[in-house]
Structure formats: C-alpha cells, structure tokens
Amino acid sequence: MQPDVVRQVKNNPKYQELISKRSAFGWTLAVIMLVIYYGFVLIIAYDPALLAIKTSDGAVMSIGMPIGVAVIISAFALTGIYVARANTEFDRLTNEIVESVK
C-alpha cells in the first residue's frame, strides 16, 4: 500500500470509529467468554458437588454435563454474534472507508 493511501485511511474518522467499535466489541465478547469458562472451572475446583447433582431421581446424568455443553455452545454463539456484527456494521464501515480513499 502506498504511504499516502495509508495516511488517508488512518486519518479517516470512519476508520477511527471502526477501530474503536471493533476493539470494544471484541474485548466485551472476550470478557464474557472468560467469565463463562473460568466460572465453570472455578465451580469444578471449589464446589464439584454442585455439578454432581443428578438431573432427576435415578438419572445417570448430572447437571454438570449440560452446563459443560452450554459452555461450549456459548463459545459458538459468541463467535456467531461477532461474525454477524462484522458482516453488517464493520463491513459497511470498511466499504465506506475504501470508497472515500478511491
């Protein structure tokens, strides 16, 4: 990329908006995932009996299994949320930046 084009992009207010929004959103989702994951790990470490509670009388499965699956599904869900926003708002801002530089 030519230095002049790079300077135009970096000076564009929409570029600054894109960087700040994308960064804040990414960090928010990362913190949410870390709270979910480490919360689950802390429950395993400090109160494993809580996750050993059976789902019903005579059941083979404890509540730890569905909660563990929910932790994994939450990672996919948060990724989907990021991709959805990236494909709409972030791509729109990127296209506006590209058009302003042309």
Image (tube, rainbow, N blue to C red):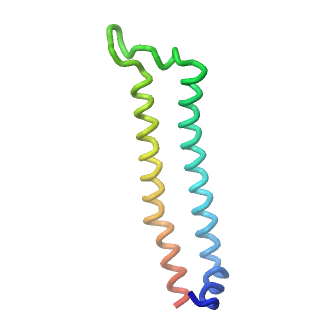
Q: How many marks?
A: 0
Q: Residue furthest top?
A: 57
Residue 79 % position (x, y): 45, 52
Relative to 81, is 43 above or below? above
Task: Identify the image quadrant of the N terminus.
Answer: bottom right
Q: Which residue is painted at 61% across and 75% down in the image?
A: 15
Q: Quadrant of residue 62?
A: top left
Q: Quadrant of residue 17?
A: bottom right
Relative to 30, is 47 above or below? above
Residue 96 % position (x, y): 51, 79
Q: Which residue is painted at 45% across and 14% down in the image?
A: 53
In the image, is 81 to the left or to the right of 31? left
Q: Which residue is painted at 47% across and 71% down in the image?
A: 91
Residue 8 % position (x, y): 63, 86
In the image, is 40 to the left or to the right of 80? right
Front in this rendered view, residue 13 or 41: 41
Residue 16 % position (x, y): 64, 72
Q: Quadrant of residue 39?
A: top right
Relative to 43, is 75 above or below? below
